[in-house]
Amino acid sequence: MEILDWIFVVGYFAFIAVIGYQTSKRIQTVKDYNVAGEKVTISILFASLAASVLGGGASTGMAGNVYKDGYVFMFAFCAYGIASVLIGYFIAPRLKAYKGAQTVGDIMERHYGKKAKLVTGILSVGLCTGIIGGQALALGTMLKVILDIPPLVGILIGMGAVILYTSFGGVMAVIQTDVLQFVLLGVILPLSLIIGLFAVGGTDTLIAKVPDFHFTLLGNWEITTFIGLFVTFLLGEALIPPYTQRIFSSKDPETARKGYIIAGFFSFGFFFITASLGLVAYVLFPGIQTDNALPTIVKELLPVGVTGLAVAALLAVIMSTASSFLNSTTVSFMRDIYPFLSRKKTSDKQELLLGRILTVIVGIASLIFALNVPSIIAALEYSYYLWAPTVVFPLVMGIMWNFRNATVGLSSIVVGAIITLIWTFALHEPFGLSGVVPGFIANIITFFIAHSLTKNNDAGSSAIKVDKEMLENDVV
């Protein structure tokens, strides 16, 4: 890169450091740190959600997998956007109406008891740590290809900045940097596609030089492989801690609804852009490693100045996701797990300090995970095994139909997790079907069997102690 490119990249890191520092001075309470004082407007919520969803998987991972398999991967990945739209229409407004809630564990406690809150907190921390690892791997890949920096050094630089501004500024800093990152990616990546198509020789030339199966719905995949991955992406990030935290941060239910829906529809266009960049790389740079597709385009095709902005944009979109999950991991631990470890009441000041220390610890754990997974998408898939077949269904049933039964909630979580583990690691995913699918089915079946066995007695419901005020504050 030239000196102008370096100015843009260094300037970006300096700017987010300033945001973290300025925001930290406005953090007065744990509520400010966890849910931004519940003051986020619809435009900010949309930009923050979009920037968080469109991370390393949707950019570097998308381009690399379309490079290898074609648009079939994009079609499967669109399940993310579909999930966002559905959640916006049906769930987000109801979720926002839970007074005082800051985590998924808070919601699960109201429907399935304190043990469900603890288990949800543990799963939340595991899920978020794994996804942060995927973003860390994307950062290392990006900096290695473009700047020839060793992957470990690149991961340390990128994640070091994320840990710094997230630990000091909390979700307020995360949301503010998300807006900056959203603006960057919304301009630079479409520009990169235009430049790439010009280098290829136009759309017609691109189509002529790419195998036909790259444009079909299933490509060379088996139908079971497509269904498995589609369901994994549909459920894997549904109502996960960072996105529910955005709902809790919004100022009212209507803001939560519109922000989610707009972000979902926006994601479809973004997926198409990064997927098409993968095809551009297929034509221009055959034989490269798949995860290097997008960084190679940035390094080889973009002019001076634009390269620096593109690097900043790609780092931005990855770092925004990493920071969101990092903050949510800390919040989940402090709200859902820490009260079970220590009965001592902590002050706001002590809790803020513990949260910041934990942010650093989780960041380090995610780095270790990143160095031990084969690819960005693999890191995401491993993480989704902790969430989609365990928490999603009982959470939705509680929010939408007010189920309140500790036995039902815990048993469905446990059985879903066991079946997923057996299918994935003992049976090695027969028929190419992701373990999320049988795990999710087992989760649903167990939920209703447990409900039928306990609905006529107090064995399940008596485990949940909910006072009248809490019931009146709930949405249903």
Image (cartoon, helix red, strand yellow):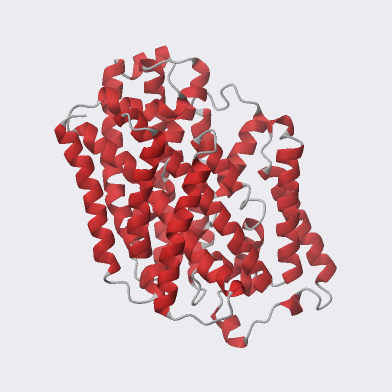
Q: In which quadrant will I find the C terminus?
A: bottom right
Query: How far across and how far down the image is residue 188, in percent?
Result: 26, 37
Q: Is residue 420 left or right of residue 256?
A: right
Q: Residue furthest bottom?
A: 468
Q: Is residue 81 visible?
A: no
Query: How far across and how far down the image is residue 19, in percent?
Result: 25, 59
Q: In which quadrant will I find the N terminus?
A: top left
Which residue is found at the position 63% from the left and 86% from the top?
Answer: 467
Q: Between residues 185 and 155, which one lies in front from this camera angle?
A: 155
Query: How far across and how far down the image is residue 63, in percent?
Result: 42, 30
Q: Residue furthest left?
A: 4
Q: Between residues 180 and 311, which one lies in front from this camera angle?
A: 311
Q: Is residue 227 visible?
A: yes
Query: How far across and how far down the image is residue 233, in percent?
Result: 56, 43
Q: Between residues 331 and 230, which one lies in front from this camera angle?
A: 331
Q: Is residue 288 left or right of residue 466?
A: left
Image quadrant assignment for residue 76 = top right
Image quadrant assignment for residue 459 = bottom right
Which residue is found at the position 30% from the left and 23% from the top?
Answer: 196
Which residue is found at the position 52% from the left and 52% from the top?
Answer: 129
Q: How many marks?
A: 0
Image quadrant assignment for residue 374 = top right
Q: Is residue 236 left or right of residue 202?
A: right
Please say if 148 is above or below 246: above
Which residue is found at the position 65% from the left and 73% from the top?
Answer: 114
